[in-house]
Amino acid sequence: MSEPTTAGRADRHRERSPHQSAGQVLKAPTLEEVARRAGVSRSVASRAMNNVRNVSPAKREAVARAASELGYVPNATARALATSTVGSVVLAVSHDDPALFGDPFFSQVLVGVAGALDRSELDLTLLLASSERGQARLERLLRSRRSDGVMLMALRGDDPLNRVAAATELPVVLGGRPLNGEPRWYVDVDNRGGARVAVEHLLSSGRRRIATIGGPTDLEASVARQQGFADALAVERLPADRVEHADFSFEGGARAMERLLGAHPDIDGVFAASDNMAAGALRALKAAGRRVPEDVAVVGFDDLEIARHTEPALTTVSQPIRGLGQEMATMLVRLIGGESPTPIILPTRLVVRGSAPGGRAGA
């Protein structure tokens, strides 16, 4: 005997219902009923039925079993809408300052994203989503399915965009991991390893009283770079307590350097978690009469254009900023195409210039 069809199984299931009266018109089961029987949310049930993102095998099997038991047949129109593409993706940034577009880091990420999408013929929508209004716009955009996927940049620990990303059924790729949780799809750089190499370079040149200017404490990249700083010092059994934080800006770096000099006037090496902060530190050191690198060696992180034009030129950790954008967009394109890529950690490398040359300057 042949296996009964889904519809046949549904008819038999309904015939067994003690509450069904003769001639009563049967109501088709809904996706909400499938979700309740499977013990999952409606969004998880929808993703499982449409074979899209981020559903565990166990939940996918539970949804399939519940759909079979209830005789649920997906609406063809809704299924088409759920699986079709519209040819557009979103890059959302938790930032509301138009000056962002002049930031060399962000501009390089954007160039990388645009280059990768150009090969895919997907349009890019850029959205500043720091304010409640911006977040609401992003939620509406994703709910309406006027986008095939979203890229999110550098989420802070309590960033509301984490909630927006978790709620959507569309694929989401993060540029940089969030401080809390581990997303399924992200592209990041080796922040901890790069910072460790930077401090090891300072140590190899004879520096022993090394400080760091860290970034915002609610960014994973900042935390990882401070961990790398501490890792390198721990090997030499040196304290990692000469720490100040700033906002990745030139002015913030200068003020943090002034605080460090006030608290620890014997500093002979500084690792700054961004080139902009390192450039600010160079200015503060010059104003305080400290020679670089003779008195204090300085290493930054990023290898932005500013690193080539400071006096002296900045030793720094180079990260593939444009490559970060390219890999984010490429990963999202693959997800939209039905693939399931793995997270990517991009390597860093040390670029040695005059602010921290090899060997102890002036020795």
Image (spheres, rainbow, N blue to C red):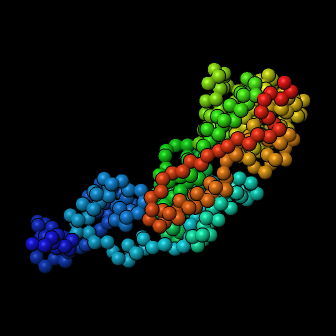
Horizontal side of residue 198 vs 132, given as left or right:
right
**In the depicted structure, whether residue 107 falls above or below residue 156:** below
Q: Quadrant of residue 330?
A: bottom right
The x, y position of residue 350, in whole percent, is 70, 41
Pick whichever, 352 or 41, lies toward us: 352
Q: Quadrant of residue 121?
A: bottom right
Q: Residue at x 81, y 37 (%)?
A: 355
**In the depicted structure, whether residue 291 falls above or below residue 323:** above
Q: Quadrant of residue 133?
A: bottom right
* Residue at the outermost top position: 237
**In the depicted structure, whether residue 10 falls above or below residue 162:** below
Looking at the rendered image, the quarter that the C terminus falls into is: top right
Q: Residue at x 79, y 46 (%)?
A: 307
Q: Residue at x 11, y 67 (%)?
A: 16
Pick whichever, 155 or 112, lies toward us: 112
**In the depicted structure, whether residue 259 falls above or below residue 330:** above
Q: Residue at x 76, y 57 (%)?
A: 102
Residue 276 visible: yes
The x, y position of residue 51, in whole percent, is 37, 64
Residue 246 visible: no
The x, y position of residue 316, in whole percent, is 74, 41
The x, y position of residue 39, in whole percent, is 29, 54
Looking at the rendered image, the quarter that the N terminus falls into is: bottom left
